[in-house]
Structures are given as C-alpha cells and as structure tokens.
Amino acid sequence: MNKLIGSYPRARIEGGGRAVVSQAGGVLLVETVRKSGLDTAISAALAPWRRPRAVHDPGKVLLDVALAVALGGDCLADVAMLRAEPAVFGSVASDPTVSRLIDKLAAQGPKALTAIRSARAEVRERVWKLAGTSSPDTTGQVIVDLDGVLVLAHSDKQDAAATWKKTYGHHPLMGFVDHGRGGTGEPVAALLRPGNAGSNTVADHITATQLALAQLPKRYRRGRSTLIRTDSAGGTHEFVAWLAKRGRWLSYSVGMTITDAIHQAVLKVPASAWTPAVEPGGETRDGAWTAELDGDVLKGWPQGMRLIVRKERPHPGAQLRLTDADGLRLTCFATNTADVPIAALELRHRQRARAEDRIRNARATGLRNLPLHDTAQNQIWLEIVQLALDLLAWLPMLALTGKHRLWEPRRLRLRLFSAAAQLVTTGRRRHLRFTRRWPWTNVITSAIERLDALPNPG
C-alpha cells in the first residue's frame, strides 16, 4: 500500500539564485514609461528639487514609487521589490531617500503638485496621439466622470474625520476619463478632502473639474467636445451654471435629486410621452422608460438645459423611496446636449456607472489607504497613485488588443506583471526569457513588440 504524500509535489527551498528575475512582467510598465516619455518629462519637472551632487534623480525616485504601486504596493517601502531587480528597474533609491523626497515635495505644496501635473498632461497628449484609434477621443468627444471616494483611516491622520457613512477617514474627489466599452479609464483629477467634506460642495466640484480639464489636450479644455458627467452631487445650480458659462461652453450630464416639483411634474407626464430605454446594443431595456420634463421645473436653471427622467422596475429586494411613483424607481439627470434622442442621452448618463469600476481599480492601486500622516504628504501620494493608474491605462491602450485591453489592474498583475523570467546576457545585451509554460507569455511578448514598434519620444 502506497503512502499518501499530499496533492502537490515537494521541492527543497534554497536561496542564492541569480539568473531568475521576479516581477519580470513589470518590463511592460518600464517600456510604457520609456515610449511615452514620462521619465524625461517627470525628471525635467522635478529638476528644481535635485541637489547638485545628488545620486538619484527625483523624477526617477517618484516614478519608482509609482511603478511599485502599479505592481501592487501600498506604501513607500514597497519600492524594495524594484530595488531587488536592477536588471529591469535600474538603480532604485533607498527608503530614507524616498521619504526625504516626499517630505521635500510636500513642503513645496502647490508648486510641486503643479510640476507633476504639468508633466502628466504633456505625456498624456503624446500617449493619445500614439494610441491612434484606441485613444479616448476617437469619437471626437472626451467624457470626464467626477465622483467622490471614501478612504478609511485607521489612525489619527491630518484631516481624517467622520464621513457621511459613519466611518472615519478622508473623502477625495476624483476625476476619470472614460475610455468607453472598449477600454478602461485614466485619472485626471484627485482632490484630497477631509472625511466630513460635503458630497455636493460646489467649490470642490469646480476645482476638480479645473484639474481634470488641465490634464486634457488644449483643444478639449473648453467647448462642447468635452462632457462632464456626475451623479446627483453635481446637480447644483452653481455648478451647472459654471459648466455652461459663456466662453466655457462645456457639455454636461449631471444627476439631479428628485425634488417635490420634479416628482409632481413626472406624475403629469402622459403615458404616450414615455420612450422605452435602450441597452448599449440598441435593444430595448426591459421595464424602463424615459421622458423629458419641461415647464416650471426648468425655471432658474441655465438656458438650454434638458431635464430627463427615467422610471424603472426596481430590482428584486430593493425598497422604494417616497419620491418614486406607481411602484417604479425614478431617477433624473440634466444635460445641455441638443438634437439627440432622450433614450440615447439616458444610456450615456447611465454609463457613468463605469466610474465605480475606476474607483474600485484605484482602491486596488494605492487608494485603499493613505499611508502618510500629513495632508500635504498624502496629496503627493495621490499624485503617485494617479501616475500608477496612468501607466495601467496607457499600457493596454498602446500595447494590448481585444479582451486584454479590458483587463483591470488585479488581472494585469496576476497574469502579466507577476511572470518571472530568466536573465541571459549575450553579445553584451541582456535578454529576459519568459517560460513557454506560462499561459500569457504570448500576450507579454506581443505587447513588448507593439511597444518597440512605437517611435521614441523626442
């Protein structure tokens, strides 16, 4: 009778291996940095903070932290995973050097933030040009989603406070460019706020929108080709008026709270005025209808605003609210887009739900926790998180195709970045050889080939 020795083979564990590179798939992010020109742009932006005889470039140090976050790190010390593989990531600064740089940038406040953001905006325009038909402005319009994020704090950090969900932490306001059904999205704004910051604060929404517009190519910083999309937190008179102000002319699609006046107007809509809602493929959405409201409910709002309401059968188990009617859930939004059927406008606004996916990805990429104590330090951390998310969005845009373009950060890490490789030096050149047994080796090598085919910056 044979003895059972377990379901898995047993191997002896030894240290001292030199020819194997862990996290070798991270070379995809390194090549994305190189082809986008992000390394030179950040280095030039942070040049004023480099000491004359400094060994490490501040731009490289900041990018190393962003790469570590993109690979799954959640604190400054996680740059150690890059430091262990100089063949892929080059020379990486020590933990004290990294901490000193963050403190130095935090002490400079808006000056350092402006430098980092300007470099990101410059590189973003180049990446969109390189991406061609895969860029988010292929349709001639750029959609920016604004949404708040609750970040819990487990210690007494600066500006941490009780949130509206009765938790404790911070309440940043984020902005993301929507890549549509064929892609993911990229961050363009991150405004750090105390945990007790209001959800519908007008000044914060205006500031976040300004930060987002500054990240876009100049031709999209005003005009109807840029759509600002929010939930009901953005449905205030002041914010809508700011978006539609003469000379700014931005398009908007903002959620609206169902007030008593809107509720009474919905009850007066005749049955013949309701239009079936549609799905992205054009088919009818079962149990959902849309209608446009006019009359007194538009008084006091900017000229050209359209108010569109949707009624839909609630999901099983959902509770109706006092503002619902006839057993149907009511939602409402406002837009200034003309000459488009209300069903198409309702579908466009409903797709704002993709912002929740972007927030989930941000939580998985350094936003689960703000690791530093001071607000100024954590604002720098938010910029690092955005750099990491930029890379995780630009890599699929430039180098992945088909269903691979839709992979979120967790899947990219598991299937691509975590792949190990053998380091081989021949003819004074170093090569990474990925094993053929890894199921996604072909995805990695094909992506590298696409990145190699792109022109070098400058």
Image: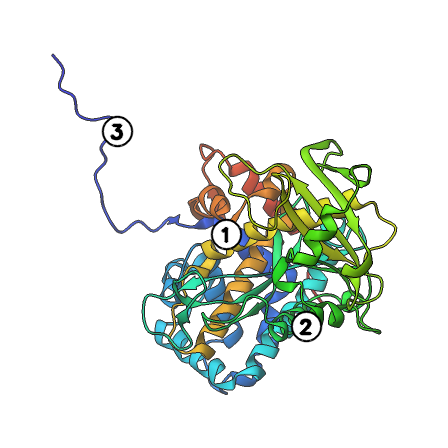
Query: Could you say where residue 169 lies in the image, as x and y percent from the top left?
Result: 40, 67
Q: At 56% from the left edge and 39% from the top edge, which residue is drawn?
A: 443
Q: Amino acid at mark 2?
A: Gln
Label drawn at residue 210: 2
Contact between marks 2 and 3 (CB within 8 A): the answer is no
Q: Nearer the viewer, residue 176 or 434?
A: 176
Check disc 3: other Cα within 10 Å, few if <14, some if 14-19, many if 20+: few
* Label annotation for residue 8: 3
Q: Position of residue 342 (x, y in %)?
A: 79, 46
Q: Amino acid at mark 1?
A: Arg
Nearer the observer, 322 or 186: 322
> Dot 1: few (<14), some (14–19), or many (≥20) neighbours within 10 Å?
some
Residue at disc 3, secondary structure? loop
Distance CA(mark 2)–CA(mark 3): 56 Å
Q: Residue at x 82, y 37 (%)?
A: 272
Q: Tell me if residue 291 can be seen.
A: yes
Residue 240 rendering spot, x and y as whole percentages: 73, 67
Q: Is residue 280 left or right of residue 434?
A: right
Mark identifier at residue 360: 1
Q: Name the quadrant of the N terminus.
A: top left
First reached walking from the N terminus: tag 2 or tag 3: 3
Marks 3/1 in contact by CB < 8 Å: the verdict is no
Depth check, mark 2 against mark 3: the one in front is: 2
